[in-house]
Amino acid sequence: MEQIQLMLEEEIYFLILLTFSLMLIQNLFTLIPIVGIIVINIALFGLVCGYIWSLATSLIGALVAFVVFRYWFQSLLINKVKKSYLEKLEQNGVFFVLLLRLIPFIPSSLINITGGVSSIRLMPFLIATFIGNALYLLLLSFVANGLLSADIEGYMLVALLIAVLPSIYLYRYLKQKTGLGENQKRKVRGG
């Protein structure tokens, strides 16, 4: 184990570049699960430094993705994003981005694409991304640290709770915003 740590210390710049590149790819295309990147960062840099590095690189990756999608691919992607997402984002930009960042099963690249093709300004997007990612990545860091230290039960319970709560809130919020309760749906269907 000591030899592995010595080897890693010798290759620190390569590892920093590698983990940054992985996070950039994750923000552009979401080919790599973010929890995998966080596990790597925590294994390499420890819990606190791994979390800070993960947060910094995720923010830089979101910034790069936002700029790329806004200025180079907006005309190509505008038709690929659901109109309802764009409308919600443009009405409640910071809140919508923040909420999406807290939901575990929504890919970062989808949030970045939607932000890039919408009319949301860069600073509100980055503020919401910072707050959302700070909370979400903190949770994932605790889970990753638990996986590495084998004290997983408590972390998994907290992770499950924190993952489910935003999902329930988003479901209720979207249901309320659409205004289609069960009675209205029946009336629309004619029954």
Image (cartoon, helix red, strand yellow):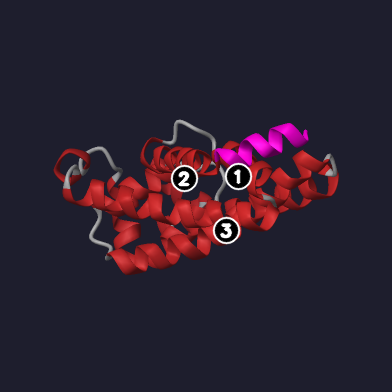
Q: How many marks?
A: 3
Q: Which of the 4 image quadrants contains residue 51?
A: bottom right
Q: Amino acid at mark 3?
A: Ile
Q: CA distance from mark 2 to mark 3?
A: 50 Å
Residue at x-position 50% and y-position 52%: 183
Helix, strand or loop at mark 3: helix
Viewer-nearest residue: 100 or 179? 100
Q: Nearer the viewer, mark 2 or mark 1?
A: 1
Q: Which residue is mark 2?
A: 186
Residue 110 visible from this viewpoint:
yes
Viewer-nearest residue: 16 or 55? 16
Range shown magenta:
1-11
Q: Horizontal and vertical percent for residue 159? A: 71, 49
Viewer-nearest residue: 80 or 73? 73
Q: Earlier in the sequence, mark 2 or mark 3?
A: 3
Q: CA distance from mark 1 to mark 3?
A: 9 Å
Q: Horizontal and vertical percent for residue 66? A: 30, 52
Residue at x-position 78% and y-position 33%: 1
Decide: few, some or many residues near mark 1? Use Cα within 10 Å; few <14, some 14-19, many ≥20.
many
Residue 175 visible from this viewpoint:
no
The dominant secondary structure in magenta is helix
Q: Are marks 2 and 3 in contact (CB under 8 Å)?
A: no
Residue at x-position 62% and y-position 51%: 50
Residue 164, numbered label: none
Q: Nearer the viewer, mark 2 or mark 3?
A: 3
Residue at x-position 45% and y-position 44%: 20
Q: Horizontal and vertical percent for residue 110? A: 38, 43
Q: Amino acid at mark 2?
A: Arg
Q: Earlier in the sequence, mark 2 or mark 1?
A: 1
Residue 41, numbered label: 1
Helix, strand or loop at mark 1: helix
Indicate left or right for 152 with 177 as reference.
right
